[in-house]
Image (cartoon, rainbow, N blue to C red):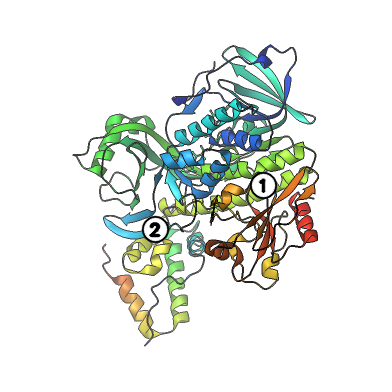
Amino acid sequence: MLDDRYDLAFRLYPYARSADQDAPAPVRHPVVIVGGGPIGMSMALDLAEQGVASVILDDHEGVGAGSRAICFAKRALEIADRHGFGVAAHEKGVVWNLGKVFHGDKLAYEFNLLPEEGHKFPAFINLQQPYFEKFAVERIRELQAAGAEIDIRGKNRVDSIEQLDGGVRLNIMTPEGPYQIDADWLIACDGAGSPTRKMLGLDFDGRVFQDSFLIADVRMTADFPVERRFWFDPPFKSGASALLHKQPDDVWRIDFQIGWDVDRQEELKEANIRARVDQMLGPDIKYDIVWSSIYTFQCRRMKKFRHDRVIFAGDSAHQVSPFGARGANSGVQDVDNLGWKLALVMKGAAGEALLDSYEMERMYAADENILNSTRATDFITPKSEVSQIFRNAVLELAKDHAFARPLVNSGRLSLPSIYDGSELNSEDGLRASGFDAPLRTRPGAPATDAPLADGWLLEKLGGRFQILAIGVAAPDPIAFDGGVAEPLAIQVSAEIQARYLGDAPSAVYLLRPDQHIAARWATYEPAAVKAALHRALGK
Amino acid sequence: MSKLVTDPNIPDHDGFYSELIALHEGRSKAESDAINAKLILLLANHIGDRAILSEAFAHAGKDQQS
Ligand SMILES: Cc1cc2nc3c(=O)[nH]c(=O)nc-3n(C[C@H](O)[C@H](O)[C@H](O)COP(=O)(O)OP(=O)(O)OC[C@H]3O[C@@H](n4cnc5c(N)ncnc54)[C@H](O)[C@@H]3O)c2cc1C
């Protein structure tokens, strides 16, 4: 009745009876999160940062085995750092910079992420998804010990929901039978197959790619370099394309593109997986298969991410093919965007327009991710003879000609979205004053990290509105209904000059609680900051 | 003497490539071949420089198996 749908990597939240199950009437909670994957757990942490209590319901008792996501991007690590487990993830993860793309046995294209110096986190790490989730849960345990109200309920499966006036009722199944709770707000982080989405009969449209990928994580002590290796038409013939990428614990991710009409059961037999892996690695390398699975990939999203009191985040709202590592990385950014907005709306300090901005900003990001993932998947799995011919022509030309190399697309790696055009942004006062200010920190962009005398800039930002004063005296705090925008004065360094000033001698930035820039000016004008703050609150 | 540009020269290269592939969507192979032929002729006329075109022909024809 409540069977596991997958094996566990870590059993972290065994079923325990909740007092709610013995209550005479459904107990009401401010926020209930359905699904304790990376996004649900991050959501609880983000809300805790805002002082909002939450209940997480997951139909399993821990983190699923099988790593799925392995590439975590800088922005996701920065957000995880604010949530309190970014350093743990970084320390466990494998940092990599180099990517090589082969066509047959020839190198067609090579990229180096060439991380800029002066950031707390690298451009990318590889880390098995179960570790990311485990670190998030460990952080939740720490916060609980310090008194935070986060309640993780394992083996609590949400079977149906009813939308009430100003809330949601959930019908939950447990090993000891069903019970009900009510929520003011329900956040659906229940993954790509989202039962919540289905319960509400909502759409999830997009493209399914007519191909499948056999994914195997193998453990071996091989001295292959720590670089991402991707083959089109690999010489070892284990698939139409193949990937090899290192993870922690001597585990390597291997992908084979095996075609659309495959017998899944047959392909997943250990002997058949080994045949493909042996062809790739050669006969002498010993390895264990840690995990394997077959996936078909799709790129799709919901038309709306919010349906009254039910809000979707992560894979439940949007799904992408993994080329570009834009799944979990973008889901973590959904959470980052939603937490502070929901907290202000719950306090009555902002109206629903602020929640509408979650939908607008994160749909914009989802579309960007879907566009990039779709293009990469089209390149990897050409869907017609002509597109195959063009693809191969690009790969052939790339060996001799520089122009063709940028066209080779085995995935464009996840970058944070810049919310250009968001209604929460105010004009770029710094550029409007005639300064050649860097575009990377224009309104809508996430703040760029930089070293400070006593740590990192991003460590000092986030969780609240802030007025960053660069090369000018710190202004007074600005109180608003629901909070205070706090000043933070920093010195000008070479990095701050390049990343925040350009040719301007000083600047004032208004930052949102998610570290995105709302507005910037050359000098401090209280009236302008107040107006921009008002706007950033969705008013 | 002018020379064929073989360094990256197209802004938004991913957008360009996807538009090129979209041009062929839903076409038969014969239709696509015809579209490609017209495309080459149009672009060749735009380039207009015989030496550059010859250079491009040489690169395109190089090592072509099958
Ligand atoms: C092969 C592969 C490789 C990938 N590589 C990357 C990568 O390198 N980088 C990257 O960023 N992303 C990657 N992804 C994507 C990434 O795995 C997902 O984006 C991520 O897992 C989404 O997290 P989530 O929390 O939204 O959903 P999920 O991880 O799916 O979690 C949903 C949770 O909800 C629970 N649940 C479901 N129904 C119910 C219910 N009725 N009641 C209670 N609980 C319920 C589930 O048990 C689960 O715990 C990859 C995906 C695949 C398949």
CA neighbours of label 1 inside 10 A, class few (<14), some (14 to 19), many (20+) = many
Q: At 65% across and 27% down in the image, what residue appears?
A: A149
- Count of marks, rendered view: 2
Residue at mark 2 to residue at mark 1: CA–CA distance: 32 Å
Q: At 63% across and 42% down in the image, what residue appears?
A: A302
Image disc number at residue A112: 2
Among all residues in the image, which is located at the extreme bottom? B1
Q: Chain of mark 2?
A: A
Image disc number at residue A346: none
Q: Is residue A331 visible?
A: no
Vertical position of residue A356 compared to residue A171: above or below: below
Q: At 55% across and 38% down in the image, what residue appears?
A: A84
Image quarter of the N terminus of chain A: top right
In the figure, residue A25 lies in which quadrant?
A: top right
Q: Earlier in the sequence, mark 2 or mark 1?
A: 2
Amino acid found under the numbered disc labelled 1: Pro
| Element at label 2 | strand
Whether label 2 lies within 8 Å of ligand 1 gets the answer no
Give the image location of residue B4, x and y in percent.
Answer: 38, 78
- A280 relative to A49 in the view: left or right: left
- Please tell me which residue lies in front, B9 or A448: A448
Give the image location of residue A156, x and y in percent.
Answer: 59, 21
In the figure, residue A183 lies in which quadrant?
A: top right
User: Which residue is disc 1 drawn over?
Assistant: A513
